[in-house]
Amino acid sequence: MVIHEPILIVGAGISGLSPALTLHKLGIQSLVLESLDHLRITGVALTMCTNAWKTLDALGIGDYLKTKSVQIHGFKPDLFKEIPRSKCEFVRFFGILTIGNSSRCMKRKDMLETLEKELPKGTIRYSSKVVSREESGNFKLVHLADSSVNPDGGGRTSIRGFINYPNGHGFEANFLAYFDTSVEDSVMASFLVMTRAYIGSAHDENKQNPFKIKQFVLSGIQNAPQQVSNIVERTELDYISYAPLKYRSPWYILQVAEA
């Protein structure tokens, strides 16, 4: 079956739904193709700074999402001062320890669900994986197959966690960071970035096992203060995610990559 659409957007992530909403506000119809059969709400938290909020304000969803976010007041570089300097180096971003009033942390799920809600029904077509593209005169033919995407990673992976404290956690609204050179990983609260794409072993099944992921993180932060390991210990298995980090250059986003 052939369907004619003026604009096709591949992927119902943030970078796919945002331009779709922009086009909708300009009165331009588009169709978003998503390989999964549901919205891509995997992932945990996002740190949104000034330019990001300007974009969300332009989309008309900034004010609402601010009510779903937590403001970050600055960096806390002295939390890990009890760790020997040979094991830990504090991160100073551009030499500034304060972030500004526009830096906030929010759930990725909240942003995606808000973007989806603002789009007309039928804008997103699920279970639609692009397998090839070809030229046909003034038209572009996009061939689909119902399956899921298995993207290549960029050499680094990230483990994220989200922790609930029903009675309050007692921490300040600061961004915490330290590097442990003994494992060549960086830990930011419950955020672990690795230069090696494996957990404990090279077997892929470990990457999908939240329990093994959690144990791997705990083994990698043995030199961290007790409050850091407690954060990881409190993280429920349902809120642990493992994913490769991918860099998308501006010219790659603006141009359709050849299949």
Image: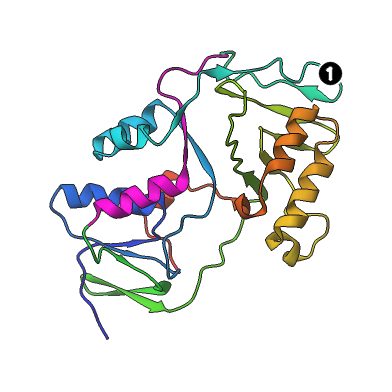
Residue at 28% over, 39% down:
61
In x, y percent, where is residue 69? 43, 33
Using the image, determine if residue 141 lies above or below residue 57. Answer: below
Q: Is residue 100 magenta?
A: yes
Scheme of colours in the image: rainbow
- Please indicate whether residue 251 sits to the left or right of residue 96 in the image: left
Residue hosting label 1: 85
On the rendered image, what quadrant is the N terminus found in? bottom left
Q: Which residues are magenta?
A: 97-119
Residue 83 in the image: state x and y as whole percent. 83, 21
Q: Is residue 198 visible?
A: no
Residue in the foreground of this view, choosing between 218 and 33:
218
Task: Determine crowd level at label 1: few under 14, some 14-19, many 20+ residues with C-alpha closer than 10 A.
Answer: few
**With respect to residue 245, does 175 lie above or below?**
above
Secondary structure of the residue carrying tag 1 is: loop
Verify whether residue 235 appears in magenta.
no
Nearer to the camera, 108 or 34: 108
Q: Does residue 232 appear left or right of residue 53 in this picture?
A: right
* Residue 116, position as x, y percentages in the image: 31, 54
Q: Amino acid at mark 1?
A: Arg
- Determine the residue positioned at 39% across, 77% down: 144
